[in-house]
Image (cartoon, helix red, strand yellow):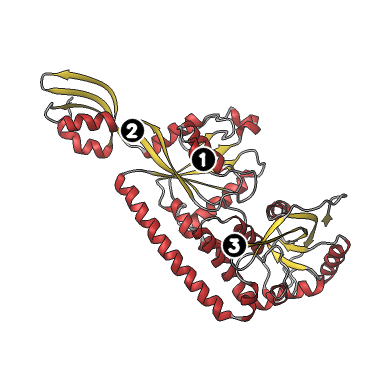
Amino acid sequence: MMTFPWSLCYTKAMLRFNENNEIITEETYRAILVGLQRKEDISYSMEELSGLAEAAGAEVLGKVIQVLEKPNTATMIGKGKVTEVAELAEAMEADVVIFNDELTGMQLRNLEDAIGVRVIDRTILILDIFAARADSKEGKLQVELAQLQYRMPRLTGFGKALSRQGGGIGTRGPGEKKLETDRRHIERRMEDIKAELIELRRTRTVQRARREKAGVPVVALVGYTNSGKSALMNRLLSVTDKEEKTVTEKDMLFATLDAQSRSVKVDSNHQFILVDTVGFVSKLPHSLIEAFKATLEEAVFADLLLHVVDSAYEEHSFHISVTDKVLSEIGAGAKEKVMVYNKIDLVPDFRTAAGTASQVFVSAKTGENIDLLIDNIKEKIFSDVSVRLLIPYTRGDISSYLCEKALVKSMEYEEDGTVFDAEVSLEDYQRLKAYEII
């Protein structure tokens, strides 16, 4: 099975990085995608692979799918199909062939020899995108570690590709020549990265301990890549007068890699930390999940998860299952969560859907039902107690605290002190029980 557009156009420029993560030059890349279909239909997976290729800056010229009971040990696909891909690559002047499944070092070498152009797989492609998008020191270290862990057992297969001076998809990040000539250097570099990540993790642990001591709850946004997590975060910030703290949002896969956290104050006595985490994707490389566990810990330690779903995508149930699987892998599968079906402005049926305590239908773009989401969050993370308190005039400090920290419904001045009808946190209620009156 083969599909390709009738007209070809120039690709978008893509940045190439050297071993120091510095921009070298701008180049254009033209790709052919190859998939192996066994029992399950892979049309969705191939569509997603096309989106990943475009996210890396490549133009997809065509797709080749072979139906086969089991992968060919030497080349993943059959010998005849390899010849077909080679002829197609030559005819369409492709620069790279991208396989939907992970390839072994031997398969990489054999395929490059037979096809005559660079061959990469889905894992290399995702790692390449992450290498281009990571901004923070921790993000770059995590990506480099995942790249090295992936390439270490495949040095033989990478030999031909890594000796080239030219760049391309799958060559960003750690130094190619070093990977080819010095395995011990790679091992040392991996140990150094792990040590640096441990230090950064300790810093995050200290910061988390401070938040817990201050009693500020944490809400984490999780979900499939491009489901609108960053857009939802910005919408929540805009309705709470924090627009200057907005984060980057783009209609593309993996627009956000580094965890972003912002303080959200929903009223005078309620605020929480909102964290935007990296998006998930099917066949997310295990090495990447392992490398990003430190960042994804924000979801593990959060008080509440907002599972953001692109309701406009027809197969969004598949996105949900992939996200749930990754959450289970990192130890956050049992966390309390709210299903947030985003982009209802594009889906008329969802606009009339009734929300519940565990699901809300919103539009980050228009702001529709954001108020319902905020109410839902408040109900989940704040354990307020309605109470009537008589505070003696000699305890003006307590009266001031209630006015500042509690939701005061009414105040009455009586002979023995001030009577407050208020909503207080469960923690404050335990401290002030002695002043409660019926």
Mark 1 or mark 3, which is nearer to you?
1
User: Is residue 418 positioned above or below 294 on the image?
Assistant: above
Mark 2 and mark 3: Cα distance apart in space: 42 Å
Q: CA distance from mark 1 to mark 3?
A: 29 Å
The amino acid type of the residue labelled 3 equals Pro
Q: Nearer the viewer, residue 47 or 11?
A: 11
- Element at badge 2? loop
Residue at the (58%, 27%) spot, across then down? 352
In the image, 211 versus 220, the foreground residue is 211
Between 201 and 316, the one nearer to me in the picture: 201
Report which residue position mark 2 lands on.
Answer: 269
- Residue 3: image x %, image y %? 83, 53
At x 67%, y 64%, the residue is 170
Q: Secondary structure at mark 1?
A: loop
Is 314 left or right of 34, judged from the image as shown?
A: left
Mark 1 highlights which residue? Answer: 246
From the image, tell me which residue sits under label 3. 285
